[in-house]
Amino acid sequence: TTVTNGKMEVEEQNYNYDLIVIGGGSGGLACSKEAKYFDKKVCVLDYVKPTPVGTTWGIGGTCVNVGCIPKKLMHQASLIGEYVHDSEDYGWQELESARKHDWDKMIESIQNYIHSLNFKYRTDLRTKSVVYENSYGQFVGPHRLKLTDKKGKTKEITGKYIVVAVGGRPKYPDIPGDKEYGITR
């Protein structure tokens, strides 16, 4: 790979993929789908290192799995509770039993919804013939990645282009109590 007059020139070789995308969040998925639109051979790597409390999640990134989507669903649950409470003023009667909230049921419903999104994203990739690897990708050369899956099995793949779209994760500040009392997943 060389850069001449601000333009990157990639040597023609036999790569496993035209494009490898590291990251299965919104940016990585959009990038991979756009490349498939141009009939490129694409691989998406998506690996979530477990948090100190053991939390992992499926494809879709932070927003889908532990951020925006679950937050919005919890907010919707609270609004429904307010509507039920206020509904008597609009003529609704005998709503006592509807005023009880089952936290575990709400969490189960939210998790089921998130899992349905994970499944949809995996199905979309398969339909578009995008290879999905639930593996950690590490550069070992300009066009070469070493993949490590959750069982520790490794292999190497190559790509003409590699996009890093890993998003962000909360950083624990390495102070006493950070993992026990920090409010993050």
Image (spheres, rainbow, N blue to C red):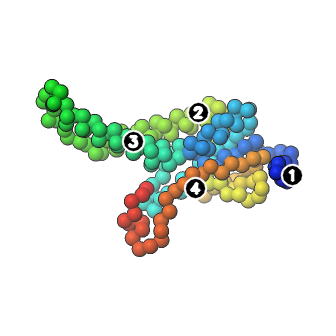
Picture quadrant where residue 153 is located? bottom right
Which of pointers 4 and 2 indicates the residue nearer the eye?
Answer: 2
Q: Percent position (x, y) of residue 177?
A: 39, 70
Q: Which mark is residue 112?
A: none
Q: CA distance from mark 2 to mark 1?
A: 37 Å
In the displayed structure, 80 sits above or below 6; it is above
List x then y, in percent, for residue 167.
57, 51
Dot placed on the residue nearer the N-terminal end, 3 or 2: 3
Label placed on residue 72: 3
Judged left or right of residue 16, residue 88 is left
Q: Are marks 4 and 2 in contact (CB under 8 Å)?
A: no
Identify the amino acid type marked 4: Lys
Provide the residue designation for mark 1.
4
Residue at 67% in and 35% down: 34
Identify the residue position indicated by label 2 in the image.
124
| Residue at 53% from the left image edge and 46% from the top image edge | 61
Instruction: Tell which tag, 3 or 4, sits nearer the viewer.
Output: 3
